[in-house]
């Protein structure tokens, strides 16, 4: 049957010299083709062709015109007892609001016709065929959505390369390019009005290296694995995936459902039915992957099947959080563990803050360096030594590219070797102050690694930098991570003070035994204890963990840093640092490196007088057996040296705390690093599940984002996804 019925000589369902097919069930006759193409180059078609040429990359053929402009829309009845698909007349334009309210028999003014029960009318026989697996292979042209929610995100791409119709927007012909991108210069971050600036789910043209970001014009490997039927022509999948991602980021505070997304599938023809059918699969995959419907989302109905919802958490401590532990005793929140978010763009922590309405404080870049004696360091000296410091690391990076150099070295040893060679070859000599500033930067590197550089692999110290990382602002969670943590814990069955002693996975099910003798049986067990506890065999596995996994566990180091926080009666540092979020302490000698290298102002509002500082590198071992009072006295001595005129009293601090993560029985560490001789592959090996029954999560199982709360969280999402997929 000819759907066009435009020519007076239309064949209807009779004879024609040639049929033109758009899908199995949608055809137009040669007479209507002739009407459109040979005799009547109407203004409508010319305008469509110009629009398509201007915006699209594909050829604006007559078939494309018919599919984009002439096919009737199909719409589903919203009556829950009906849900039949109906074909609209050609003059009716489909909108999301119409799709949300349509009932069988509805008139143009949305008034229900009187009389017969229109829902009782049979559904068109073609609808049943659309749901068959073979139907998609008979589709001549891929679906291109109109008015997709993804459109504002993807203005720099050819619409038809990202699953959208070129007839929707307008770009002049001189802005065309040969790839999937238009020659328009988009805003650098492609900010969508009203959208959180940290939400950038799509790569913009020529952009790379951004974590949790997708190419809108290309399927990723896991998507191809999950949806192989779209490998030849991914247009339908891209249209659905891009629509879903955009819809989620426009409103991340409500569960995104297939029903909500289906309203925005605006495409003519029977293919709309197929798109709505596929929507559920794509949305479920993206939910399982943790790209949508994630974070601290409140759900009225579970997102996963009932068999995947029976979860119990066994926590060794009497509190949740592990190495996230906030202290509020000084009137502001100070994280005894994590508190900073490194790179907020697409960071799930930023997503959770947006969901809860929590504001993060953007950390400024300025960090004045003060010498003992109180003198501020000339910024040009800091800049110069920062350059030399990074140049040294660049040489280390070049060294490890040499495949003939198979032997690893400690990073500290390699840094000193490169520095020595540079000074000899250049004939330069660092001044005493320059040497101290270099020590400050090395101290920061030890803070980042969580270890003295003598224990860190020169080959693999920054192994994760080979993967896309989180970019954008570094922020301070002024309210701490606990707010997010307790929100995530709502409604969960958490058993505190319940240390696990053994995990027996020798049978069909896994048996877990606690130190008090309690036992549980489960289909799957997720182990998320700190690396140190695995290294020290706190949990007995039966059968024992493989030699390969144990080798990986021991090739990683258990890094340790400690924190101190001090409250004062007044903000004595304000006049000197002038609103900066932190300031640096130049160590007087290499022996003092890592002893309170940076001080953070913990109240950006400037009302409370609280400073927090870090102990890192060899300084951690130096203070391990000291009493808190002694450590605070050392810290106060440093502050008196940096602020001689402002601080005279020996004990100015009114409140303080000192962390002891190295002594904490259930942590014994801060975060992991790669030891000399190891590699980043160890993170992947540690993350491997055992027989589909025992799984592993935690920052030390995340090769891409180790050492961070974000990495720990994403490892949990990863393992939940694996379990759900099984």
Image (spheres, rainbow, N blue to C red):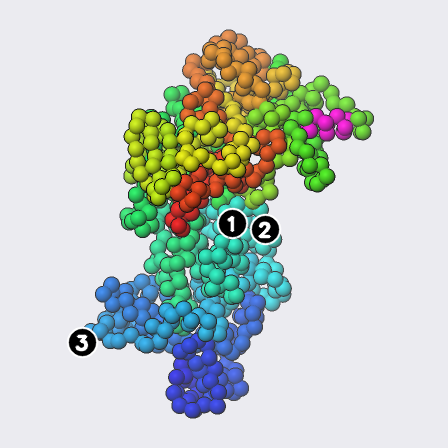
* Closer to us: 688 or 5: 688
633 displayed left or right of 539: right
Picture disc at residue 207? 2
Q: Residues within 10 Å of mark 1 (few under 14, many from 20)?
A: some
Picture disc at residue 115? 3
Compare marks 1 and 2 and give the one earlier in the sequence.
2
Residue 557 place in picture, x, y as percent: 54, 29
* Closer to us: 248 or 236: 236
SS at circle 1: loop
SS at circle 3: loop
Compare marks 1 and 3 and give the one earlier in the sequence.
3
- How far apart, in angstroms, are the residues tagged by discs 1 and 3? 53 Å
Residue 383 appears in the picture as rendered = no
Q: Residues within 10 Å of mark 2 (few under 14, many from 20)?
A: few
Q: Which residue is depicted at the point 49% across and 84% down?
A: 33
Residue 610 place in picture, x, y as percent: 46, 21
The quadrant in which residue 501 appears is top left
468 displayed left or right of 131: right
Compare marks 3 and 2 and give the one earlier in the sequence.
3
- How far apart, in angstroms, are the residues tagged by discs 1 and 2? 10 Å
Residue 348 place in picture, x, y as percent: 45, 42
Q: Based on the picture, tell me whether residue 365 belongs to the magenta stretch.
A: no
Q: Which residue is depicted at the point 42% across and 91% down?
A: 15
Residues rendered magenta in the picture? 414-423
């Amino acid at each position: 049957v000819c759907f066009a019925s435009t020519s007076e000589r239309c064949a209807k369902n009779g004879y024609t010299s040639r049929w033109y097919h758009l899908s199995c069930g949608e055809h137009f006759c040669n007479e209507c083709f002739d009407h459109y193409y040979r005799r009547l180059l109407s203004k409508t078609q010319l305008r469509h062709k110009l629009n398509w040429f201007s915006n699209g990359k594909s050829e604006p053929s007559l078939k494309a015109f018919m599919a984009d402009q002439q096919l009737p829309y199909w719409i589903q009845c919203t009556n829950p007892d009906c849900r039949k698909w109906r074909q609209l007349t050609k003059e009716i334009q489909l909108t999301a609001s119409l799709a949300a309210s349509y009932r069988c028999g509805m008139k143009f003014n949305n008034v229900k016709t009187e009389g017969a029960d229109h829902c009782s009318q049979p559904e068109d026989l073609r609808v049943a065929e659309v749901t068959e697996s073979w139907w998609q292979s008979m589709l001549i042209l891929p679906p291109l959505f109109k008015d997709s929610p993804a459109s504002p995100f993807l203005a720099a791409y050819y619409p038809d390369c990202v699953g959208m119709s070129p007839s929707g927007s307008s770009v002049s012909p001189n802005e065309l390019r040969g790839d999937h991108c238009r020659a328009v210069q988009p805003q650098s971050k492609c900010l969508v009005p009203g959208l959180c600036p940290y939400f950038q789910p799509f790569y913009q043209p020529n952009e790379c290296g951004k974590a949790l970001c997708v190419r809108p014009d290309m399927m990723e490997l896991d998507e191809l694995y999950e949806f192989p039927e779209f490998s030849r022509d991914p247009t339908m999948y891209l249209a659905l995936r891009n629509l879903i991602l955009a819809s989620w980021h426009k409103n991340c505070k409500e569960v995104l459902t297939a029903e909500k997304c289906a309203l925005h599938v605006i495409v003519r023809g029977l293919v709309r039915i197929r798109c709505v059918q596929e929507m559920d699969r794509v949305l479920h995959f993206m939910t399982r992957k943790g790209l949508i419907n994630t974070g601290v989302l409140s759900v009225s109905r579970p997102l996963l099947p009932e068999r995947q919802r029976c979860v119990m958490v066994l926590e060794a401590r009497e509190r949740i959080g592990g190495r996230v532990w906030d202290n509020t005793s000084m009137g502001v929140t100070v994280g005894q563990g994590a508190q900073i978010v490194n790179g907020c763009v697409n960071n799930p922590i930023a997503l959770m803050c947006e969901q809860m309405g929590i504001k993060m404080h953007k950390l400024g870049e300025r960090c004045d360096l003060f010498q003992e004696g109180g003198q501020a360091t000339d910024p040009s000296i800091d800049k110069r030594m920062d350059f030399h410091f990074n140049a040294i690391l660049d040489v280390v990076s070049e060294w490890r590219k040499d495949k003939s150099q198979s032997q690893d070295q400690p990073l500290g040893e390699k840094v000193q070797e490169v520095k020595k060679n540079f000074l000899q070859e250049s004939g330069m000599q660092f001044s005493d102050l320059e040497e101290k500033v270099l020590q400050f930067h090395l101290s920061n590197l030890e803070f980042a690694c969580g270890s003295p550089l003598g224990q860190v692999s020169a080959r693999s110290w920054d192994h994760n930098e080979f993967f896309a990382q989180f970019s954008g602002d570094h922020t301070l969670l002024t309210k701490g991570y606990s707010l997010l943590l307790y929100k995530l814990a709502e409604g969960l069955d958490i058993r505190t003070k319940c240390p696990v002693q053994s995990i027996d996975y020798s049978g069909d099910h896994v048996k877990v035994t606690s130190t008090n003798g309690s036992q549980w049986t489960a289909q799957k067990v997720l182990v998320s204890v700190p690396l140190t506890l695995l290294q020290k065999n706190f949990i007995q596995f039966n059968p024992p963990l493989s030699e390969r996994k144990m080798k990986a566990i021991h090739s990683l180091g258990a890094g340790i840093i400690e924190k101190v926080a001090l409250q004062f009666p007044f903000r004595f540092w304000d006049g000197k640092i002038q609103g900066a979020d932190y300031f640096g302490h130049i160590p007087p000698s290499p022996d003092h490196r890592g002893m309170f290298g940076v001080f953070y102002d913990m109240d950006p509002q400037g009302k409370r007088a609280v400073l927090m500082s870090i102990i890192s590198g060899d300084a951690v071992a130096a203070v391990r057996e000291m009493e808190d009072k002694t450590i605070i006295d050392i810290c106060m001595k440093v502050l008196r040296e940096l602020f001689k005129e402002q601080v005279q009293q020996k004990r100015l601090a009114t409140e303080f705390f000192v962390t002891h993560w190295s002594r904490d029985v259930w942590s014994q560490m801060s975060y992991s690093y790669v030891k000399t001789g190891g590699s980043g592959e160890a993170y992947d090996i540690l993350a491997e599940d055992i027989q589909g029954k025992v799984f592993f999560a935690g920052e030390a199982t995340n090769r891409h984002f180790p050492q961070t709360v974000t990495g720990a969280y994403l490892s949990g999402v990863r393992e939940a996804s694996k379990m759900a997929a099984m």
